[in-house]
Image (cartoon, helix red, strand yellow):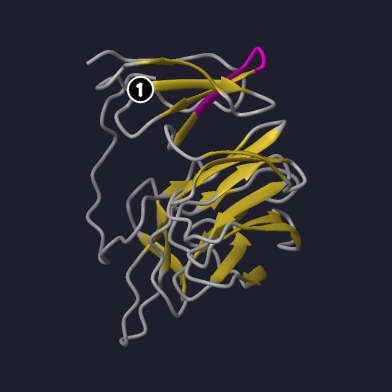
Amino acid sequence: VTGAEMGVHPMTFTPSSAPCGTDATAYVGSWSSPAGNKTLYSVNLADGQQGWGYRTLGHITAQPLVTGAPRQLVCFASHDRQVVAVEALGAFEAAPQPSWIHETGGANTADLVVSGNLLLVPSQEGSLYALDKATGAKVWEYISGEPLKSAATGTKRAVYFHNAYGFHRLDRAGQLVWTLETGATEFVLERAGKVWLRDAQGALVIVDDATGEIDSGHPLAGWYIPANPVDGTLFAVSP
């Protein structure tokens, strides 16, 4: 509410990912090592005390996330090709066992995203996986042919992702709708039959929702424009 700092707590491990969390507990990745340290740690937000941990065989550099209903799970992906979900328990509870584990075809280094009932997992072997967030079952897999190094975006109508071949739109069943080979790297929003994107220089690129044909462009280099996959409202902060 106020933006006031509530506390600074030094960690006894070296974080390898951005954190996620609940109101009481943070979950953060840590570098793997032969010493047997955990690669996901829980941290009590009230006092910064380290709680239970979970060990994967590979690093966790993608940001974990906490899912919502019907089950509150911490989902995280690692460089050893695994996507794991455990219960989002408090730091001082007994360490949870995996609720599910799904193995992909390559290292998972990009952030995970929840969109509706889907958990979107980009993988370095070039596939985008859509998993059931509650069970880990594969709903569909889109094979792109190039490593996926950034998070996908899901809306009520589509799934978007970028790789070396261009910017792609899939329908919610994982079927390709169009590919924009040049001119866009990031999703911004959907509105009124158009999809608003950004290119590598920060300019807005507006394309036709159905065909992917470029409608217009607007140079806004230096502006901060976060993605809004929810309601089509554009937020922008000038430099």
Q: Which portion, as a residue range, is magenta?
A: 188-193
Residue 144 vs 232, above or below: the answer is below
Q: Badge 1 is on which residue?
A: 203
Secondary element under disc 1, as helix, strand or loop, is loop
Q: Nearer the viewer, residue 182 or 175?
A: 182
Viewport quadrant of the N terminus: top left
Residue 114 vs 40, above or below: the answer is above
Mark 1 Cα-neighbour bin, 10 Å: few <14, some 14–19, many ≥20: some
Residue 147 vs 192, above or below: the answer is below
How many numbered circles are shown?
Answer: 1
- Tell me where residue 164 appears, x and y as whole percent: 43, 51
Identify which residue is drawn at 33% across, 50% down: 47
Identify which residue is drawn at 48% across, 56% down: 148
- Tell me where residue 176 appears, x and y as whole percent: 69, 45
Magenta span contains residue 171: no
Identify which residue is drawn at 35% across, 66% down: 30
Identify which residue is drawn at 65% across, 70% down: 102
Viewport quadrant of the C terminus: top left
Can residue 131 be seen here? The reply is yes
- Tell me where residue 151 appears, x and y as whole percent: 49, 47
In screen coordinates, is 34 left or right of 62? left
> Where, by quadrant of the figure, is residue 182 drawn?
top left
